[in-house]
Image (tube, helix red, strand yellow):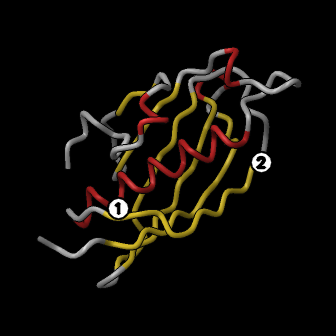
Amino acid sequence: MDRSNPSLGCTYFNQLSYRYVAGDADAILELDVTDDLRGPNGGVHAGITSVLADVAGAMAIAARTERGGATSSVSVHCLAPAKVGPLRATANMLRASKNSAIADVQVTDVGNDGRLVAVAHITCGLFAAS
């Protein structure tokens, strides 16, 4: 998997200020928090947090299975507002079968003492091995 392009082909995500971070997980992405990502209360919009979790989970699955795939299910639980940034999504694949895989993702607000702001489960349908 090419970690220099963590968007996995998503043009929308390429417009955001994110980066891949090496570490002790299947995939770690960081996203800088800018004013255009904030809602009226000053916190990052939950949709942005969800996109970050989705891409990190898909990266983790692709890294472990060495297969491409498409997200089939996203479950995100927002626990606290993300206000400082950057946001860090740490993803690990939990299990893979012949046709699908699931990853666990934790999103933290690094600039706010690493506060846990969301947890997610990402399920991807896997493309046929080439």
Type of the residue with mark 2 = Leu
**Crowd band around label 1 with a 10 angstrom C-alpha radius: few (<14), some (14–19), many (20+):** many
Where residue 29 appears, x then y in whole percent?
43, 37
Where residue 56 appears, x then y in whole percent?
44, 48
How many marks overall? 2
Where residue 37 appears, x then y in whole percent?
67, 24
Type of the residue with mark 1 = Ile
Mark 2 — residue?
A: 79
* Residue placed furthest toward the left: 130
Which of the labelled discs sits on residue 61, or is there none?
Answer: 1
* Residue placed furthest toward the bottom: 98
Residue drawn at 67 percent across, 57 percent down: 76
Residue drawn at 58 percent across, 27 percent down: 110
Mark 2 vs mark 1: in front: 1
- Tell me the SS state at disc 1: helix
- Tell me the SS state at disc 2: loop
